[in-house]
């Protein structure tokens, strides 16, 4: 998976009419190119290969769907038969065949004396039990209406039936008949049996033929009707493969067009799920920076912040790991359950979410709502109370631990939150403050990262002016306001210790006074705070008119004779794709055309420029971005809210269900614990894992689509759809043929 889509080229192929079908078939096997429709104004019913497509559809109708055919096909072969049974059956068959040859030889020898002028007779011979001869003769008379002659002779040796074990007398029969109809029935039976085995391959061939003729309808013919012309989008990295595939193909001269190339982002089974998450928002523009590589880390991390629990994350990880390890079996079975298919396709996403949930569960020190005391708590009550103060310990159910007292707090817990907070009455107050600040910090960093990624788009498309007129104002507005909020959070954590915690001011009050530009009645965080806050607010306000008027005024000046900032674009349009021409008989290479980035059309003349339209779009973007910085920062508080809800639901479930089974001290408590644990496990999976997991998944999805991707990702492109026969099995599944 790359950080942006692959470079595409537009190739024009000239194919001989006689070899066009084979060339298209080879391209379908390779799956390299996407064909463009060169006959957009021609109706589908008026195209050249309509009759061939109709014949393919008629053949599809004849073959039919599997669900509509009442054909019983043998799908399981006996692979566990014993060698003894196989040898016995072979011996019996050979013995029967020996007797049949011996007796029928006598029949045929007597028939050879018949005159050569007699009509030719055909015959069928076989072996049947003696008791069934009369019924067989009557059935043969009725079916063939008397046009057969039945001769039979008894076998001297008695043969055993392997199925029943009985010893039976057998008879060799010889049926002589005139005409072709009776003999053809046996032949037709054999043909139909072979046809049933080849039905799937026939369906595949018909599907391929139909797809090839559809592609041929997209092509156009030259005036002599001897050459087929096709235009294809192809990744530049696959040009050599395209050249080797099409020995008869060629590439035309450069043609000036403004079509946007399709977007191709290669992925594997691990990254395809994350790529699907991104493309559900929209397919990226051609050569636009893709958020998918970063989503592999950020998406499961944001999910885990809301779903942080060591126990729940472990269950989710084990479930995903089971799907990953058995993925070959599941792919082979192809279950029809759509819900299961959705889970299976996202198995690597679930695996990453489970692993990150284990990590955040360790940070929260939360496992099924209980804390793990691995390293021992750093808090101790011994230093606050002596033996003379036992009365205080006995008369007070709740005790406040003062970290200012020496020996009460020995230092931070090595990993995560100290387990003693699980017993504290003010645990919720502490966790709320911690998770709320953490959500704001993560949100500002995530949004700032999205704004920074827009620089790579500006640099790649050689739009240097957007760095000064879009990126810098956006980044300054975000960091001067909400980046400063993150700074105050960290400064308060570092500047105020336990001893002077009572003097620590409220960050919320200072942040509000920052916009009001007035001094706070409380103690300032640091010297010179008021002056710095006024400066940051002024910079943020000044960035708004730059963001609003900068780009429209620059484009207006540029289109009225101004000199560009030395910015050029590659190729024929702002999309930046490349045409391909033949350099030699051995290779293909892209041809690059340089043109000015703004203000000039493809022909070199001035483009039509509507200042009002550009200004309106920029005004909408400015309002959306400035208000979005406020709403998006608040939107990240959902990390705090869902994390709190998940922890509280887990705690309620433990207290209301599991604790009932653990409180019983009698021997019956062990028996009672089994159904209690079953109920606890069922509720945990259904509510906390499935429902809460789905909720956290959707919220993480929204944070990526709205708060992160809209900073740099437009998502208005067209996905590269190559002509590939390997995609036909998915069509078979839709048609019920697999």
Image (cartoon, rainbow, N blue to C red):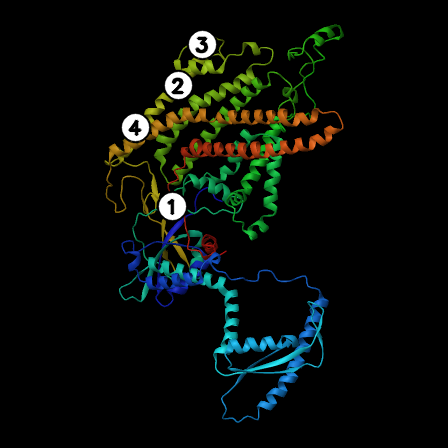
Q: Mark 1 Cα within 10 Å, few/some/many (few <14, many 20+)?
A: some
Pointers 4 and 1 in contact (CB under 8 A)? no
Instruction: Give the foreground label among 2 and 1.
Output: 1
SS for dot 2: helix
**Mark 3 lies on residue:** 520
The disc at residue 67 is none
SS for dot 1: loop
**Mark 2 lies on residue:** 537
**Mark 4 lies on residue:** 549
Task: Say which of 706 and 2 sits in front.
Answer: 706
Looking at the picture, how far across and down is residue 237, in whole percent? 44, 52
Looking at the picture, how far across and down is residue 680, in whole percent? 63, 31
Question: Counting residues from the N terminus, which is met first, the one under dot 3 or under dot 1?
Answer: 3
**Measured Cα–Cα span from mark 2 to mark 1:** 41 Å
SS for dot 3: loop
Question: Counting residues from the N terminus, which is met first, the one under dot 2 or under dot 1?
Answer: 2
């Amino acid at each position: 998976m790359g950080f942006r889509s692959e470079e595409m080229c537009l190739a024009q192929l000239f194919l001989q009419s006689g070899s066009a079908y084979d060339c298209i078939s080879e391209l379908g096997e390779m799956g390299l190119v996407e064909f463009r429709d060169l006959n957009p104004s021609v109706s589908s019913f008026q195209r050249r290969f309509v009759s061939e497509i109709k014949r393919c559809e008629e053949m599809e109708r004849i073959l039919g769907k599997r669900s509509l055919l009442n054909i019983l096909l043998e799908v399981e072969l006996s692979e566990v038969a014993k060698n003894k049974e196989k040898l016995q059956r072979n011996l019996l068959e050979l013995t029967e065949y020996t007797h049949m040859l011996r007796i029928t030889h006598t029949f045929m020898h007597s028939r050879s004396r018949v005159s050569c002028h007699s009509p030719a007779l055909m015959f069928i011979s076989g072996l049947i039990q003696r008791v069934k001869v009369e019924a067989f003769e009557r059935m043969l008379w009725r079916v063939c209406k008397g046009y057969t002659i039945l001769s039979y002779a008894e076998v001297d040796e008695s043969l055993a039936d392997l199925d029943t074990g009985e010893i039976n007398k057998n008879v060799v029969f010889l049926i002589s008949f005139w005409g072709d109809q009776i003999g053809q029935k046996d032949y037709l039976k054999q043909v139909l049996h072979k046809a049933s085995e080849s039905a799937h391959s026939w369906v595949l061939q018909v599907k391929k033929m139909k797809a090839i003729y559809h592609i041929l309808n997209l092509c156009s013919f030259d005036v002599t009707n001897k050459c087929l012309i096709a235009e294809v989008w192809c990744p530049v990295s696959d040009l050599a493969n395209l050249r080797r595939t099409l020995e008869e193909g060629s590439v035309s001269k450069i043609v000036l067009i403004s079509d946007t190339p399709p977007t191709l982002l290669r992925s594997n089974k691990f990254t395809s799920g994350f790529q699907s998450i991104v493309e559900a928002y929209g397919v990226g523009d051609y050569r636009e920076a893709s958020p998918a590589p970063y989503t592999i880390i950020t998406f499961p991390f944001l999910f885990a912040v809301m779903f942080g629990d060591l126990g729940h994350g472990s269950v989710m990880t084990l479930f995903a790991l089971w799907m990953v390890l058995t993925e070959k079996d599941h792919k082979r079975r192809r279950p029809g359950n759509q819900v299961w298919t959705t889970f299976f396709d996202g198995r690597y996403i679930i695996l990453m979410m489970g692993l990150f949930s284990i990590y955040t569960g360790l940070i929260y020190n939360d496992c099924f709502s209980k804390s793990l005391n691995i390293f021992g708590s750093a808090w101790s009550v011994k230093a606050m109370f002596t033996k003379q103060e036992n009365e205080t310990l006995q008369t007070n159910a709740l005790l406040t631990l003062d970290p200012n007292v020496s020996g009460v707090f020995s230092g931070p817990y090595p990993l995560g939150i100290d387990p003693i907070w699980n017993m504290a009455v003010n645990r919720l107050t502490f966790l709320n403050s911690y998770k709320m600040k953490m959500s704001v910090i993560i949100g500002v960093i995530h949004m700032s990262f999205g704004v920074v990624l827009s620089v790579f788009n500006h640099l790649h498309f050689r739009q240097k002016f957007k760095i000064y007129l879009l990126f810098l104002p956006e980044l300054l507005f975000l960091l001067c306001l909400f980046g400063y909020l993150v700074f105050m959070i960290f400064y308060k954590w570092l500047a105020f210790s336990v001893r002077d915690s009572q003097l620590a001011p409220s960050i919320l009050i200072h942040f509000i006074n920052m916009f009001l530009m007035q001094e706070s009645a409380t103690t300032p965080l640091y010297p010179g705070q008021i002056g710095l806050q006024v400066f940051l607010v002024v910079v943020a306000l000044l960035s708004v008119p730059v963001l609003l008027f900068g780009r429209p005024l620059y484009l207006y000046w540029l289109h009225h004779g101004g000199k560009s900032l030395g910015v050029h674009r590659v190729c024929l349009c702002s999309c930046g794709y490349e045409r391909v021409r033949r350099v030699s008989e051995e290779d293909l290479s892209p041809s690059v055309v340089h043109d000015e980035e703004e203000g000039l059309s493809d022909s070199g003349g001035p483009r039509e420029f509507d200042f009002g339209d550009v200004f309106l779009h920029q005004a909408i973007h400015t309002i959306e971005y400035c208000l979005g910085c406020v709403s998006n920062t608040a939107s990240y508080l959902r990390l705090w809210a869902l994390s709190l809800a998940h922890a509280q639901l887990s705690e309620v479930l433990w207290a209301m269900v599991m604790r009932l089974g653990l409180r019983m001290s009698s021997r019956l408590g062990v028996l009672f614990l089994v159904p209690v644990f079953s109920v606890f496990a069922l509720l945990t999976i259904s509510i906390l894992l499935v429902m809460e997991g789905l909720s956290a998944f959707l919220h993480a999805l929204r944070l990526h689509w709205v708060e992160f991707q809209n900073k740099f990702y437009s998502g208005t492109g067209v996905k590269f759809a190559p002509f590939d026969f390997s995609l036909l099995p998915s069509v078979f599944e839709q048609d019920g043929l697999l």
